[in-house]
Amino acid sequence: MGYDEKLALYKTAVSKCKAFDLKGKTMPYTSANGHMFSQLNKKGELGIRFSQQVQERYMVEWSSGHFLSYGAKMRGYVLVPERFWDDLDAMATFLQEGYEYVMSLDPK
């Protein structure tokens, strides 16, 4: 699956969530409360930000790791496995979970 197809799917997953919108022209992302909580990198990989406990759980459950953007490890982000590109309802649920996490943080 190529970048453009993943971008279209990311847009669809975000559109299922009414509390936030997709932002960014060259680097698509979502943010709320002054905090970014998801991003699609140039490789077409999706990372979502979660609390430390949730990160650790999903890395094990998903057999995944940290999300990289521009070669740098994004602290707090988990790389979403390829299998979730076929389940946009699950992806929307994870995006909503990331949103709720950043809404619990102090605003920037």
Image (spheres, rainbow, N blue to C red):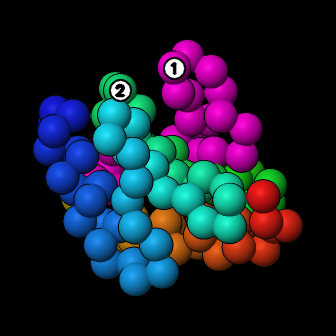
Q: Nearer the viewer, residue 4 or 58?
A: 4
- Return the x and y of residue 65 as percentages of the image width and height: 60, 36
- Return the x and y of residue 3 as percentages of the image width and height: 21, 34
Residue 63 is left or right of residue 50, and the answer is: left
Q: Which mark is residue 70?
A: 1
- Quadrant position of residue 41: top left
The kind of residue tagged 2 is: Lys
Q: Does residue 81 appear anywhere in the picture?
A: no
The kind of residue tagged 1 is: Tyr
Q: Residue at x 63, y 45 (%)?
A: 77
Residue receiving disc 2 = 42
Residue 88 is left or right of residue 107, and the answer is: left
Q: Residue at x 29, y 72 (%)?
A: 15
Q: Does residue 67 appear anywhere in the picture?
A: yes
Instruction: Say whether marks 1 and 2 touch (CB < 8 Å).
Output: yes
Given the current orientation, which residue lies at the most extreme top position? 71
Range covered by the magenta-colored residues: 64-85
- Return the x and y of residue 54 as percentages of the image width and height: 71, 61
Q: Where does the N terminus fall, quadrant-wise?
A: top left
